[in-house]
Structure formats: structure tokens, C-alpha cells
Image (cartoon, rainbow, N blue to C red):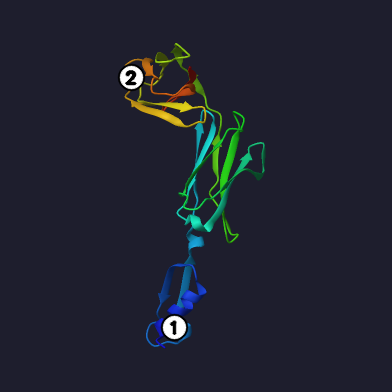
Amino acid sequence: MNRILYLAIVLLIGCPQLVQASLMLPVGEGRIGAYQLSCQSSFDLAQVSLSAEVHPQGIALSWSTEVDMDRVHYFTIERRSSQDRSRFEMIAGIRVHDRQSSGFSYLDDQIPQGRLAEYRVKMVFHSGKELFSDVVRISSEAQFQQISMYPNPVSEVAMYSFYMDQLESFEIGIYNRSGQRVARQYVAAPSAQRVVRRLDVRSLRKGWYTLRIESASGVWQTSFVKP
């Protein structure tokens, strides 16, 4: 049998979940033992990318993976607080359904304000193998500056104002009670420190909302109700 063909068969038998393989041929005449084989499985290449963001209702986690979801059984979300760094505790589990996308999210609304927390996600395969994401460290404490709004509750249009020490561009976001952003707008740097703007809520459903403004140097936040 051709030597290269023989080595390819050996490689496939030894690496059934073959993703990458390399074959180094000896210089000149050599024996079969002179060949070098290496393989890398899809499990070895698997990764879970995790990110965390402070939301008005808590810490919003999102993660993704390029692994085929047919191979994944479930995910667990684990948290370690600054008060007990000895271990991670599982705070939630997410079962993977057939043909589910590779992007996932979870809102942790139980962590008290002002506490640092570390998060990681564990991906469990049907085979029993486990894979952890990198650890993400974040504080739930946000130094929110106040926004003045009138009227509140607001059924159609309200006026709001806030002060900026640094005149810079900012982003306006409106979040519902579940922490989902329902509106977003980017605004150029104002010409004065006192910023006064108009808020049109006629397109929003009835309910409780958070108005949040973010710039490079500060965060402003207030809540309002649409009756």
C-alpha cells in the first residue's frame, strides 16, 4: 500500500473528529516510523465568547460559540462574588434546543448594587465533555447622574434635561422593565452644559421604562411610566 495513503488511514482512525491534520514527510528515504502525525479535534478548537454589560435591571450576559449546536446539551451560567471568591456558584441553566442559534443571553437581576462579580459560562456536550468560557469581571454599581423629566407619567411627549461637565457626543437609550433596549439614538456634542431635549413616547407600549444617557465621561438615568 502507498505509504502516504496508509498514513492517511491511520490518521483518520486515530482522529475520528478530524478538523486539522499535518503530515511531515522525512527527507530522503525513510521508514514508516519516520513520519510525524498530528491531529486536532473540533473539541480542542471550541471556544465560548462571553461578554457582560451593566443594564438598568442588572448584569446582561451574552455569549456565542461556533460549535455545532447539535453537539451541545446545555449551558450553565456561574457567578463568583467579591465576598466569596473561593468558588463559582451556578445561577442558571439553559438547555439547547434543536436548530437553535449559537448566540445566547441571560440577565442577572439578583446581584446587589455596588458588588463586584465574576461570571463564566460552562458548555456541556452530549458526550459529557465540558468547556468553560473566560471569566468576565464586572461591577453592578453604576454612578448614575440624575435626569429631570416633566411630565412623568408621560403619555405622548415629555421634556428632560441634564448637565454635562464635558461637552461630548452621547447615546440615548430607552429600556423596558425586562432590560431590553427598545429605542436608541446618537446625539452630537451639545453647545451648552445644560442639555434640554424632547422625548416622544407615542410609539412605546404602556409600561415602566428607563431612560439612560451615556457618554465617554458619564451616565445619566431616570425612570418614567407610560400610562
What amino acid is at disc 1?
Tyr
Looking at numbered disc 2 in the image, what kind of residue is underneath it? Answer: Pro
Q: Secondary structure at mark 1?
A: helix
Decide if residue 27 is on the left or right side of residue 33.
left
Kindly give the residue lying farthest to the top in the view shown.
Answer: 151
Closer to the camera in the image, 35 or 74: 74
- Image quadrant where residue 113 sits: top right
Residue at the image point whose x is 45% and y is 13% from the top: 148
Mark nearer the N terminus (2 vs 1): 1
Residue 102 in the image: x percent, y percent? 46, 50
Vertical side of 66 occupied by 225: above or below? above
What number is the disc on residue 201? none
Seen at 40% across and 28% down, the residue is 183
Q: Position of residue 19 (x, y in %)?
A: 44, 66
Nearest to the observer: residue 181 or residue 162: 181
Circle 1 is placed at which residue position? 6
Disc 2 on helix, strand or loop? loop
Label 1: how many Cα within 10 Å (few below 14, some 14–19, many 20+): few
Residue 216 found in image quarter: top left
Tally the marks.
2
Identify which residue is drawn at 39% across, 86% down. 2
Residue bearing the label numbered 2: 190
The quadrant the N terminus occupies is bottom left
On screen, residue 126 versus residue 169, left or right, reads right
Residue 82 x %, y %:
63, 37
Q: Is residue 157 above or below residue 56?
A: above
Above or below, 45 relative to 78 = below
| Residue depicted at 50% across the width and 71% down the height | 16
Question: Residue 172 in the image: x percent, y percent?
Answer: 40, 25
Of tags 2 and 1, which is closer to the observer? Answer: 1
Is 57 left, or right, of 170 in this rendering?
Answer: right
Q: CA distance from mark 2 to mark 1?
A: 72 Å
